[in-house]
Image: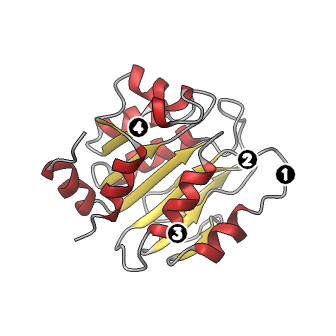
Amino acid sequence: MALDDKIKRRWRESRILLLGGSAGSFKILFRLVKLLPVNLNKTVIIVIHRKKNFLSEIEKLFGENSRMLLREISDKEPIVNNTIYIAPANYHSLVENEGFFSLDVSEAVWYSKPSIDVTFESVADVYKGKVTAILFSGANQDGATGLLKLRQEGALTIAQHPEDAEMAEMPRSAIDIDAAEYILRTTDIFELLENTN
């Protein structure tokens, strides 16, 4: 689909860019991290499923290729503009009203910790409609209900087109419950996020 002026305007007005994915999403998230400009004027939060107790090289690889400051979320860390935050393994990452992150050790959701739903729902509570959230490839339903809550709070919600996703279940689950206001091909997602002026 062609990107209309409404979606471009809402993206530009967002304060938070939320990116969620699991199996099959690494490559596209890596490309996005490389693409985002240093002066994006937004906070970027990435939640990607990791194997339990698996030492991840994601932060190192993303950080070496990002133009923006990139860091793993720490408990009680203030949320800073023009920064990319990655949810750490074995914790749920939440956003607090005071503009801080918190880490939670409760049970896995959809067999996942970090859970996309947990982060998306907490961001919806705090930032309401000042969010653009995108759900990418994955092999389970995590993220769908969180994306729905974001949409209900007025956020711009996008699902990767299932035909473009390596694992279609995650974006399709969001589409099935009408959580995604827009269903975009990967090329359209990149075109949107490059539209910063």
In the image, residue 167 lies at what x, y percent?
59, 32
Cα–Cα span, label 2 and label 1: 7 Å
The residue that label 2 is drawn on is 50
Element on which disc 3 rests: helix
The residue that label 4 is drawn on is 159
Can residue 80 be seen here? The reply is no
- Counting residues from the N terminus, which is met first, the one under dot 3 or under dot 1? 3
Cα–Cα span, label 4 and label 3: 20 Å
Element on which disc 1 rests: loop
In the image, residue 28 lies at what x, y percent?
54, 52
Q: Are marks 2 and 1 in contact (CB under 8 Å)?
A: yes
Amino acid type, label 3: Lys
Can residue 178 be seen here? The reply is yes
Please identify, in this view, whether the residue under mark 2 or under mark 3 is nearer the observer. Answer: 3
Observer-nearest of 158 and 190:
190
Q: Which mark is residue 34?
A: 3
Amino acid type, label 2: Arg
Q: Are marks 4 and 3 in contact (CB under 8 Å)?
A: no
**Placement of the N terminus among the 4 image quadrants:** top left
At 82% from the left and 44% from the top, the residue drawn is: 52
From the viewer's perspective, tell me whether residue 70 is left or right of residue 148: right
Amino acid type, label 1: Phe
Question: Residue 38, relative to residue 149: is it above or below?
Answer: below
**Placement of the C terminus among the 4 image quadrants:** bottom left
Amino acid type, label 4: Ala
Element on which disc 4 rests: strand
Q: Which mark is residue 65?
A: none
The residue that label 1 is drawn on is 54
